[in-house]
Amino acid sequence: MEHELMNIKNNAVSLILDAKTIDELEEIRIQFLGRSGTLTQTMKEITRLPKQERPEIGKLANETKKIIEDALSQRIETLSQQKVSLRAKKLDVTEPGVRPPLGHLHLITQAIEEITTIFSNLGFTKVRYPEIEWDYYAFSAVNFPENHPARDDWETFFIRQEPHPKKGPVILTPHTTSGQVREMEKGILPIKMLNLSKCYRRQSDVSHTQMFHQFEGLVVGEGISITHLKGTLDYFVKSYFGPSRVSRIRPYHFQFTEPSFEVDVSCGVCNGTGTLKQVQGDKEVSVPCRLCKEGWLEMGGSGMVHPNVLKYGGIDPKKYTGFAFGWGVERVLMMKEGIEIDDLRLLYSNNLEFLEQF
Ligand code: PHE
């Protein structure tokens, strides 16, 4: 019966939308809602259903009736308006048409395209690795000893599934670093990969969404050094944020890189000075920048690939070296816009008022 009601609704609505005259609509009304109309007949049959099914089907039938009635009255209104406006003015076929509303790509998609283009100019190849991943690639193979407390920093989602005998539990990948050893396993050197994909972590607040995007660069070859890393960072920063911006690296710690760095970008609001001039009364005073910490914005992690990671990927660390970096797409996007968005979750709320601004 549910199926029948759905068919009635679909047939009626498509006939109504195709109707060209008000007389036609009256015929459709009789066909479905008249005394011997299809819907009226079907509704009579409800009394023959088992008692426990009646309330639900009854509700569905009433909803179907309401939808058909609404569609009819809307179409009647549209047709009568068209009649009035055609009568009111002669149709001028040379008049310019009404432009249909034009949307744009979501701002995350725009950022992904821009980031990909910048790195492909440097010869990076874009790849994507599974979002549903084994513990092995996300942690063990990138040098996290088993039960190491640093694993907790990557607040991981676990999938309820039998662990793989060698690769361990199934998880949602918490970072794009899980693509490093997968890329090395392809056995092709040198490597210049850009792994851009969705990542998941158990955190949701104004500055975190449980799903977010990271992009990970990995370069492995002979004689790769920190200068290559720094040059790549600068190229990205200038291309993405603008020619006046610079990057700096600070010592940090990650399991999978040695040495490790945190990358900062000079702030675009205060031009890296950390202060802004403000007029107070008739005096000009310096106030701390509203966006950054002392002229710098934190972008994310990077470092020289740890020899153990190369070994896991079957690469001889005595012969080859590499660098890697991994940053959040949402984060660099917000930094570029120079805005501190009150709630990062807005990005995924499909709120047009927000999205139309970009
Ligand atoms: N995977 C790290 C994170 O999610 C970022 C990173 C990638 C750091 C590559 C160093 C090298 O925070």
Image (tube, rainbow, N blue to C red):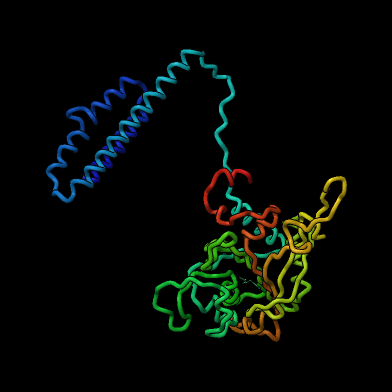
Relative image position of residue 144 (x, y in whole percent)? 58, 82
- The residue at the far front in this view is 281
Does residue 280 appear to the left or right of 118 in the view shown?
right
Q: In which quarter of the image is ligand 1?
A: bottom right
Q: In this view, does 237 lie above or below 40?
A: below
Q: Name the one closer to the observer, 336 or 12.
A: 336
Q: Name the one closer to the observer, 221 or 294.
A: 294
Residue that appears at 58% across and 79% down? 150
Q: Name the one closer to the observer, 64 or 20.
A: 64
Residue that appears at 34% across and 31% down? 70
Relative image position of residue 287 (x, y in whole percent)? 80, 56
Relative image position of residue 284 (x, y in whole percent)? 86, 50
Q: Is residue 103 above or below residue 137?
A: above
- The residue at the far left in this view is 48
Relative image position of residue 24 (x, y in whole percent)? 31, 22
Residue that appears at 16% across and 42% down? 46
Occupied quadrant, residue 16:
top left
Quadrant for the N terminus in the image: top left
Does residue 173 appear to the left or right of 284 in the view shown?
left
Does residue 23 appear to the left or right of 294 in the view shown?
left
